[in-house]
Image (tube, helix red, strand yellow):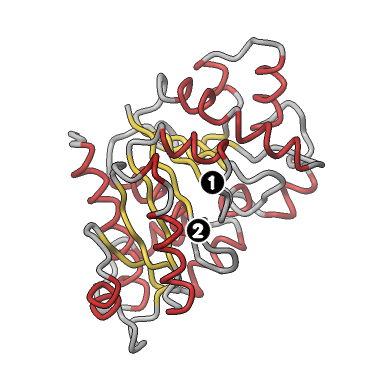
């Protein structure tokens, strides 16, 4: 039905993957849609270990298993055997019928990383046939043609930008500098957001003329801990009804605002 890409033009701690995890998980919790979250970052472990304890994944050799996740998918692409159903078979369900995740691929060289990204449009196209929503967490700062091709095929690009002023201006220039995505539907998100900063969302939007829609995802150490402990879903379920003024309630509210913006743009109906 639709492909949503999460991407940040800045290196460092922008919170991009945390935005992808929070938004895709809350979409699965709050809406009757079937979704797939793809980790397009080669050799990455953050998404997988947010839903399963890192030690358990290591003990099961999940990150090196060629019959799991993107490792298996890349092998099937090379043998010309990829199909929509196969993608579902090699994804891990984390919310039954609502959210699956596709582990990242192993890549030992720059060439292999590029091959993985070049295959992403084909993978997303096949996944789009069996899932209502396909979320893709792209490598940060990547602007080569393989990553841009993924963004060109997206229905929505979630651009995660830093709150730091010296990086913020540079981020917007990079985003605006990619001609082929200028007309793409975008959602801007200030990641790892600190509301008490002088450079809050209102001042930043005014100063840098960031177009709507623009949202924030606050820094929340308990959410980060939950991701590190492999129980992000428990954290979200535990706090889903927390008051908006509560530390965790504010985080859930802000993430839900992004979810509802996606629902509005895509005209998702229950």
Residue denoted by label 1: 138
Q: Position of residue 188 (x, y in %)?
A: 33, 59
Q: Is residue 35 left or right of residue 57?
A: left
Q: In which quarter of the image is residue 80?
A: top right
The crowd level at tag 1 (other Cα within 10 Å; few <14, some 14-19, many 20+) is many
Q: Name the residue nearer the viewer: 225 or 118.
A: 118
Q: Quadrant of residue 245?
A: bottom left
Residue denoted by label 2: 9
Q: Quadrant of residue 129?
A: top left
Q: Position of residue 232 (x, y in %)?
A: 50, 57
Q: What element carries label 1?
A: loop
Marked residue nearer the N-terminal end (2 or 1): 2
Q: Position of residue 144 (x, y in %)?
A: 58, 43
Residue plotted at (42% across, 53% down): 177
Q: Is mark 2 on a helix, strand or loop?
A: loop
Location of the C terminus (image quadrant):
top left
Q: Name the residue nearer the viewer: 212 or 259.
A: 212
Residue plotted at (33% across, 64% down): 252
């Amino acid at each position: 039905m639709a492909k949503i890409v999460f991407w940040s033009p800045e290196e460092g701690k922008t919170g991009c993957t945390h935005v992808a995890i929070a938004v895709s998980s809350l979409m699965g919790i709050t809406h009757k849609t079937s979704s797939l979250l793809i980790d397009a970052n080669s050799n990455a472990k953050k998404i997988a270990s947010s839903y399963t304890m890192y030690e358990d994944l290591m003990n099961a050799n999940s990150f090196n298993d060629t019959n799991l996740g993107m490792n298996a998918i890349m092998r099937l692409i090379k043998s010309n055997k990829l199909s929509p159903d196969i993608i579902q078979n090699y994804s891990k369900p984390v919310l039954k019928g609502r959210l699956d995740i596709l582990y990242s691929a192993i890549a030992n060289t720059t060439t292999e990383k590029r091959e993985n990204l070049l295959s992403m449009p084909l993978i997303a196209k096949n996944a789009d046939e069996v899932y209502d929503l396909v979320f893709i967490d792209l490598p940060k700062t990547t602007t080569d043609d393989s990553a841009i091709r993924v963004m060109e095929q997206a229905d929505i690009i979630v651009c995660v930008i830093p709150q730091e002023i010296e990086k913020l201006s540079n981020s917007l220039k990079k985003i605006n500098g990619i001609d082929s995505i200028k007309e793409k539907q975008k959602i801007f998100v200030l990641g790892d957001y600190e509301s008490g900063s002088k450079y809050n969302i209102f001042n930043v939007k005014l100063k840098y003329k960031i177009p709507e829609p623009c949202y924030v995802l606050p820094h929340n150490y308990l959410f980060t801990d939950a991701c590190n402990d492999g129980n992000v879903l428990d954290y979200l379920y535990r706090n889903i009804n927390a008051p908006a003024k509560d530390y965790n309630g504010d985080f859930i509210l802000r993430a839900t605002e992004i979810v509802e913006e996606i629902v509005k743009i895509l005209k998702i109906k229950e």
